[in-house]
Image: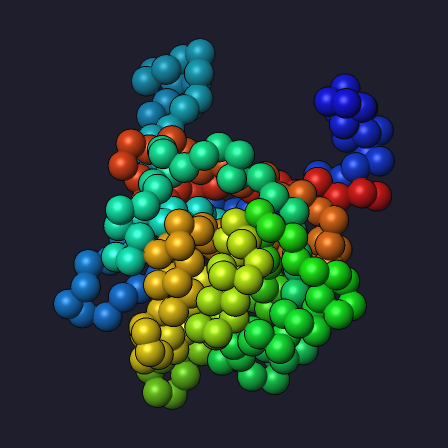
Amino acid sequence: MLQNLLQSIVSEEIKVIDLAQPLNEQTPVIQLPEPFANTGGFKYVQLSNYDESGPGWYWNDFVAGEHVGTHFDAPNHWVTGRENDGVDTMPIKNMIGEACVINLTEQCAVNPDYLLSKDDILAFEQEYGRIPEQAWVILHSGWGKYGQDPDKFFNIGEDGMPHTPGFSAEASQFLVNERSILGVGVETVGTDAGLAGSFDPPFPNHHIMHEANRYGLVQLANVDQLPPRGAIIIATPLKITGGSGSPIRPIALVNS
């Protein structure tokens, strides 16, 4: 069975889609208001480049926060999940699941504060079938095209607040309680909307998903290349001891 899978990948009967944004010093990084501590951006330090510091090799050091660029949110990232899994303790099988991609690009283009609702989920299921257990539910907002443009990516309004889409609390609760998903994925800087700090509870997707020991995939790219159903996402964070997240390079396997 595995040999058949490998042959299908080699022959491109199954396409491999790169879901990661480029990770560099221009990668947009979330900025929290004072007095909260902020993560640093990605930083690169060259050690040698076939020179006197290393004549036969090229290599570098890098520094990055756990939640920089395309990354994985573990349950212990949020206070409601503080006793739940980190990236080092989560079951490795939970890094793999079917992608259910809910396309809300038109709604998000009209209203950047759009929240995926329970009705959106039910409409998706009416057309594509029930979301299975252990699935990744991906909010396709169209934000992936802004992944290297901080101004458009954060979309700061005249009110000084970011205006980006996310999940309603009702939808998050439904996906956890009624569909038992693995977690959610987004193209934006976080799994909650830009204005979610003012919601009740604040940042409801984080609050609900991580309390239930579920996961988040953040700052995804190439979501427009995924079908509504059937793709398999493989998202493996670094095994950082006690880690709350990790930059990742997730891939999707898609039938040609």
Residue 183 in percent (x, y) is at 50, 53
Q: Against 241, is 58 above or below?
A: above
Q: Against 153, is 86 above or below?
A: above
Count the marks: 0
Residue 184 in percent (x, y) is at 52, 57
Q: Residue at x 37, y 74 (%)?
A: 196
Residue 42 in percent (x, y) is at 36, 46
Residue 97 in percent (x, y) is at 61, 43
Q: Residue at x 48, y 32 (%)?
A: 92
Where on the picture, by quarter, is residue 125?
bottom right
Of all residues shown, which one is farthest toward the left? 35
230 displayed left or right of 147:
right
The answer, for residue 5, to whether it is visible in the render is yes
Where on the picture, by quarter, is residue 11?
top right
Query: Foreground: 111 or 137?
Result: 137
The answer, for residue 66, to whether it is visible in the render is no
Q: Against 38, is 74 above or below?
A: above
Q: Residue at x 30, y 39 (%)?
A: 243
| Quadrant the N terminus occupies | top right
Query: Foreground: 119 or 53?
Result: 119
Query: Foreground: 228 or 91?
Result: 91
Q: Residue at x 40, y 54 (%)?
A: 212
Of all residues shown, which one is farthest toward the top? 56
184 displayed left or right of 123:
left
Query: Foreground: 223 or 123?
Result: 123
134 displayed left or right of 86:
right
